Image (tube, rainbow, N blue to C red):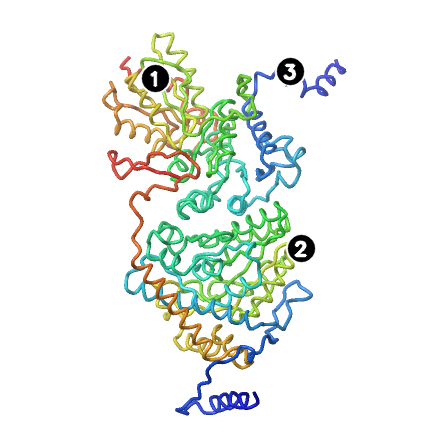
Amino acid sequence: MQNMLTLISNVFRLGNASKNVGTRMVVSARSFADFTPQASFPIKKCDLHRLEEGPSDEALLTREQGLQYYRTMQTVRRMELKADQLYKQKIIRGFCHLYDGQEACAMGIEAGINPTDHLITAYRAHGYTFTRGVAVREILAELTGRRGGVAKGKGGSMHMYAKNFYGGNGIVGAQVPLGAGVALACQYQGNNQVCVTLYGDGAANQGQIFESFNMAALWKLPCIFICENNKFGMGTSVERSSASTDYYKRGDYIPGLKVDGMDVLCVREAIRFAADYCRAGKGPIVMELETYRYHGHSMSDPGVSYRTREEIQEVRTKNDPISMLKERMLSNNMSSVEELKEIDLEIRKVIEDAAQYAISDPEPSLDELCNHIYARDPPMEVRGTNPWVKLKSVS
Amino acid sequence: MASLRSFLQCNFDILRKTFVILFVNVRDALNQAMDEELERDERVFLLGEEVAQYDGAYKVSRGLWKKYGDKRIIDTPITEMGFAGIAVGAAFAGLRPICEFMTWNFSMQAIDQVINSAAKTYYMSAGFQTVPIVFRGPNGSSAGVAAQHSQCFAAWYGHCPGLKVVSPWNSEDARGLLKAAIRDDNPVVFLENEMMYGVPFELSEEMMHKDFVIPIGKAKVERQGTHITLVSHSRCVGFCLDAAAVLAKEGVECEVVNLRTIRPLDVDTIEASVMKTGNLVTVEGGWPQYGVGAEICARIMEGPAFNYLDAPAVRVTGVDIPMPYAKILEDHSVPQIKDIIFSVKKVLNM
């Protein structure tokens, strides 16, 4: 046992000390008992608005959690990159707003709420669609417009739904009153659930958001308003769009938190704090997640006309959410390079299979064209493009 | 005298139910419909400006807050886009909201939530997400409220797939259609008329039953006729019946069709009537261009009833102007009974 440990520590020492060493000693048959089961990490303190106390400045991460967060964030990353590839091959068309760079937000939020809680976001929604339980293949097949897509090909990138996940919304800001309404339903039904309502820095100036703040505060709705501030609303930087860029303070009379959105643990602790606050009946809370998107606003936007490649590269090297988690886990012996590589390979396979499915699955049948106009109604006739074409619609 | 008055006031409710049981005005019909549906299903709730403590801007929700309290009857701030969106979100999450617009003119502030968030969602989600919501309020012209408060939205909302759009005329319509709308799992735009609120109509015992519903999407022939079909909705149905009474004295028998529903349009009933009478005049309060009447005429052209027309179908509509204020101008901006009579005679070449 002692020799085994010496061997292992030698591998690490050698490996870390000299990156140019050609030979590497691969240790096989690692026992998982060798890994650290959990560790505590200091996290950035949140800026507070109208709050005496904020989330803890320390986060406990178990090995299982770390692996799960890694797996989820890496899956979202790979899925978005695959979508990029498919879009450039013209297999995906129309709008495609990618989430890579922001994975810690979606993962941190999901880690801090329950599956029975609710979530609604805007159009940069693929990450949340996944964390809320939709399989990668159903997401990609929706992007490619096939019948196996989560919305049977009828919704597209911006209109994917799942249990307790209300999309996917195309109109900037409209999802915020909707989210407050979901929170109203939670309060009405007395089920102790909360609604996480997301919007971007671009949407943060929308009047309907302030209308929602007012009613949520007035009626103490269990609504967590979250501004994902990725510094740009399409091509407009926050300095050029907002008289106040302190988005966590924009709720005015509503308490707010400013959170490092690139750190999944920071996000998780913050959302736990916020959810507890709402569940205690104290009313809504506003969170600002400082984050960054590597892609442009959408696939039509190269994303370099309003920011420099250097800036993007800097975030990638210094602040990438997945790298940050990986670094933490490795340096605390909570996982190994090999184990994480294995996970990467598994994810690659999942994504490849999903992409294959998304390419080969047939498009929706034309019989589907007029379905789902009305719910729970008898079949009806729908006018086609000319008076002689009478199409059938079923619920 | 004073004691009689106080006796009447104390017992007004009982007296109303005893003596006025057969005559219910549209306002009370709407009120009773909501009351019964609130009682029947605890997921139903009402929100809007002044609906609770004020008893409703037009008193349509009178007494409901007293009976059901703050949870079920919610006064909102004057923020249509916000509260309409909140109502739709509540519908997403399993409640059955009734969202009142003080008038449908104010719905323009919230129209994105009605169309993009409510109407289209069932389709975009391929049947996953239902939106069981009713948007209701007074629509169309009132009296002396001028241009910004007098628009008819039947054509605008009737244009959109995914919505049901309903326009009751009398108390029977109001009661049966509102109950149907609240029980419907789809977003329903419910267009009332302020001028009709105070008008009493006879309601049969069957209509007073708490499960009395009128199917959405079905028009009603209010008056049988043989010479010409008049198709209308909301308040203008009454004008058509009045015009028909006058024309009957001259030997012209008008068939009056009350659309009841703007979308889905009951083309079958209209066609059957036109195939019987051979002539068609549509009557509406809204503007002519791209309106309800325009749609009806187009459908008749495209369908089997065209071959039965003895003359082109025409429309009687509001004048194509923003609503003026002065009474004489306002009176001449909306279809009057004489306009209907005139058009009928023109179509019949009398």
* Residue occupied by mark 1: B342
Q: How far apart are marks 3 and 1 (CA)?
A: 43 Å
Q: How far apart are marks 2 and 1 (CA)?
A: 65 Å
Question: Label 3 neighbourhood size at 10 Å, few (<14), some (14-19), many (20+)?
Answer: few
Which is in the foreground here, disc 2 or disc 1? 2
At a point 53% along the width and 17% down the height, the residue shown is B204
* Residue occupied by mark 2: A282
Of residues A64 and B38, the one nearer the viewer is A64
Marks counted in the figure total 3
Q: Are marks 2 and 1 in contact (CB under 8 Å)?
A: no
Residue under mark 3: which chain is it in?
B
In this rendering, position of residue A293 left or right of residue A91: right
Residue under mark 1: which chain is it in?
B
Question: Label 1 neighbourhood size at 10 Å, few (<14), some (14-19), many (20+)?
Answer: some
In this rendering, position of residue B309 left or right of residue B30: left
Q: What residue type is labelled 3?
A: Thr
Q: Is residue A301 above or below residue B134?
A: below
* Residue occupied by mark 3: B18
Q: Is residue A319 above or below residue B123?
A: below
